[in-house]
Image: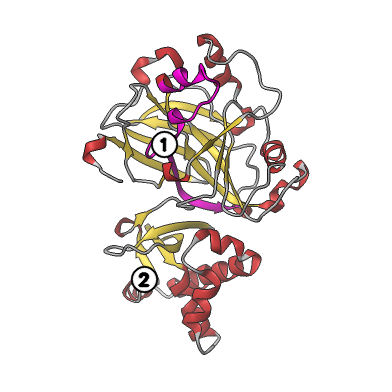
């Protein structure tokens, strides 16, 4: 399943949706409303709405904490909606009218986990990216472990939400990254057992202010250059692990205004998902945490290595990973989009 956190038109309360394509159209299945219909119409269960809301909820972290039971309810709802739609076009209209379905274009997607407890971001995991850093002196040697830093939850935004150009710094860069969503609280996980602790995968665009980062490196602590407002676009979906046969063999890339800037495969990662998860799980991970896996080469880089690639106001950035969809965001001026 492709799970989403979304806002229906005119509403301010997030809900959980399941992405669905049908007869050339793109929709979100409202998970709670669909399961309510399943319980009431198929199972004839009294109190269907209360049961559906309690089990699935409207919060992705709470849904994931519900484990296999909650995910099975989502899957059953999704399958039942597809069955109803098989009756013909009239089924689509009926489900739209009762709020079980929403047209994809009528809703606002938030990040799948709008406020993760923590985002553990891997700093160097593709040889091409490391070589680019070596060329400018920003990276001196291959890491012996998956190095990481933290991104704040307040930096997270969803697909189609704006990237706000910071009021400080002048070198805004992009980094498409395959990212793991932690499915249960865990610690000291063996590399071979990592999938048991992962709910699924999403895309993160690990935005960076390169000039700010370089200034911060003098103190040895990088923070502001990775944590400005909207520095962590995430989405569009949380794709459950059963849909991704091999996360170590996915096409990954990024475009700016339609021009390809990054293009690689997750086969090029130095440390696998399992190795990364095992290493950082020793700190303790919680349900809904996000772990990125590094970015391929092709960014603007440090010391204005490719100044023409630096992001500018108005640029449209599309980060895409095979099987996970496309994370799309546009860069805007800070004063054009007040958020705080």
For the residue labelled by badge 2, is the local secondary structure a helix, a strand or a loop? helix
Which portion, as a residue range, is magenta? 212-240
Whether residue 79 can be seen here: no
Residue 4's x, y, as percent? 46, 57
Q: Nearer the viewer, residue 75 or 216?
A: 216
- How many neighbours does mark 2 have within 10 angstroms: few (below 14), some (14-19), or many (20 or more)? many
In the rendered view, tell whether residue 2 sits above or below residue 46. Answer: above
Quarter occupied by residue 126? top right
Which tag is nearer the camera, tag 1 or tag 2? 1
In the rendered view, tell whether residue 95 sits above or below residue 161. Answer: below
Residue that appears at 55% across and 63% down: 62
Instruction: Judge whether residue 219 is colored magenta.
Output: yes
Q: Which residue is mark 2?
A: 92
User: Which of the image's four quarters has the N terminus?
Assistant: bottom right
Q: CA distance from mark 1 to mark 2?
A: 37 Å
Q: Which residue is mark 1?
A: 231
Tell me if 81 is positioned left or right of 197 in this view.
left
- Of mark 1 and mark 2, the one earlier in the sequence is 2
């Amino acid at each position: 399943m492709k799970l989403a956190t979304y806002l229906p038109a005119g509403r301010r309360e997030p809900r959980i949706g399941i992405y669905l394509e049908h007869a050339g159209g793109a929709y979100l299945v409202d998970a709670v409303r669909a399961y309510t219909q399943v319980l009431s119409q198929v199972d004839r269960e009294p109190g269907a709405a209360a049961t559906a809301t309690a089990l699935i909820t409207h919060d992705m972290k709470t849904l994931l904490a519900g484990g296999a039971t909650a995910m099975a309810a989502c899957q059953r709802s999704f399958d039942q909606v597809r069955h109803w739609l098989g009756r013909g076009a009239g089924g689509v209209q009926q489900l739209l009218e009762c709020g079980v379905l929403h047209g994809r274009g009528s809703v606002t997607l938030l990040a799948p986990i709008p406020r993760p407890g923590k985002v553990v971001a891997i700093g160097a995991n593709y040889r091409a990216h490391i070589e680019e850093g070596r060329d400018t002196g920003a990276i001196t040697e291959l890491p012996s472990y998956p190095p990481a830093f933290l991104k704040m939850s307040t930096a997270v935004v969803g697909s189609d939400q704006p990237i706000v150009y910071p009021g400080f710094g002048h070198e805004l860069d992009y980094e498409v990254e395959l990212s793991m969503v932690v499915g249960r609280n865990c610690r000291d996980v063996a590399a071979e057992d990592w999938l048991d602790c992962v709910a699924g995968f999403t895309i993160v665009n690990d935005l960076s202010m390169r000039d700010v980062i370089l200034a911060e490196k003098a103190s040895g602590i990088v923070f502001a250059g990775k944590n400005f407002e909207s520095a962590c676009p995430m989405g569009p979906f949380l794709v459950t692990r059963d849909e991704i046969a091999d996360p170590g063999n996915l096409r990954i890339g990024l475009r700016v205004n339609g021009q390809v800037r990054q293009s690689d495969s997750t086969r090029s990662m130095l440390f696998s998902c399992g190795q990364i998860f095992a290493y950082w799980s020793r700190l303790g991970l919680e349900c809904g945490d996000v772990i990125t896996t590094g970015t391929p080469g092709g960014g603007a880089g440090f010391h204005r290595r490719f100044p023409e690639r630096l992001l500018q106001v108005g640029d449209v950035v599309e980060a895409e990973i095979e099987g996970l969809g496309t994370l799309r965001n546009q860069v805007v001026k800070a004063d054009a989009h007040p958020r705080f």
